[in-house]
Image (spheres, rainbow, N blue to C red):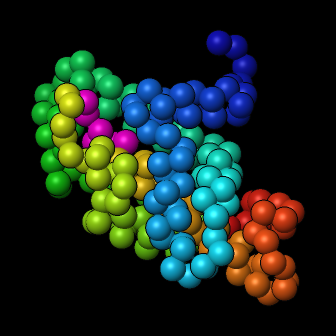
Amino acid sequence: MEGRVHSRTVKEAAVRLLAERGVTLEQIAEIVFELQAPYHPHLSQEACLDSVKRVLEKRELLHAILVGVELDKLAEKKALSEPLQSILEKDEGLFGCDETLALGAVFAYGSIAVTTFGFLDKCKSGIIKQLDSKTGGQVHTFLDDLVASIASSAASRLAHRLRDMEEAGAGDLLSVPEEHEDAP
């Protein structure tokens, strides 16, 4: 492959990998809804899904998905050297590189995303809990944390947008134009 890899190609590959590993954007949006609904009673699933899709525009997060899922897949094939192979297969608690990779992608969305990531890493909500269960023969050492990263970033993004709407006196979240997408 010559030259740069287009962002569209990277996003398509990352979303495809999520789907191949049994993770839908809707499942991630459900976690976002759980996180934000207590603060915004009129929040819709559609707004949460939109926020998930928006954070999946960030290259750093997409790159983290590509790297992490690839390592999970290599561990399933027993293609890694020891002791890394055993560490990933067991998802050893002191490994930490999985959280580090996922956490690095969260920083773009501020302290709400960082603290929410920590919460999700502990409570294992929704699809994250399924991925962490170590059933079904798949290795998800990185993927569970990457899904937490996506959800926490999307929740933080949404929290900031909802606050912006409140301050602007706007009513419907979906009617507010996406003006400052680079900001959290």
* 50 or 46, nearer to the observer: 46
Instruction: Please state which of residues 158 and 60 is positioned toward the viewer in this rendering.
Output: 158
x, y percent for residue 31: 46, 60
Q: Is residue 84 visible?
A: no
Q: Residue at x 47, y 67 (%)?
A: 34
**Residue 107 image offset from top left, x and y in percent:** 54, 63
Image quarter (top left, top right, bottom left or bottom right) of the C terminus? bottom right
133 inside magenta stretch: no
Query: What's the magenta bit mostly, secondary-structure-wise?
Result: loop
Rendering coords of residue 163 (x, y %): 70, 81
The image quarter containing residue 84 is top left
Q: Nearer the viewer, residue 3 or 54?
A: 54
Task: Tally the numbered discs.
Answer: 0
Image quadrant in which you'd find residue 153: bottom right
Nearest to the observer: residue 146 or residue 165: 165
142 in the magenta segment: yes
Left or right of 33, for residue 163:
right
The magenta span reads 138-143
Report x, y in % for residue 8: 71, 31
Residue at 29% in and 46% down: 130
Image quadrant containing the N terminus: top right
Q: Is residue 115 above or below residue 132?
A: below
- On screen, 114 above or below 24? below
Q: Is residue 176 left or right of residue 134?
A: right
At a point 25% along the width and 30% down the height, the residue shown is 138
Residue 138 visible (yes or no): yes
Residue at image x 37%, y 42%?
143
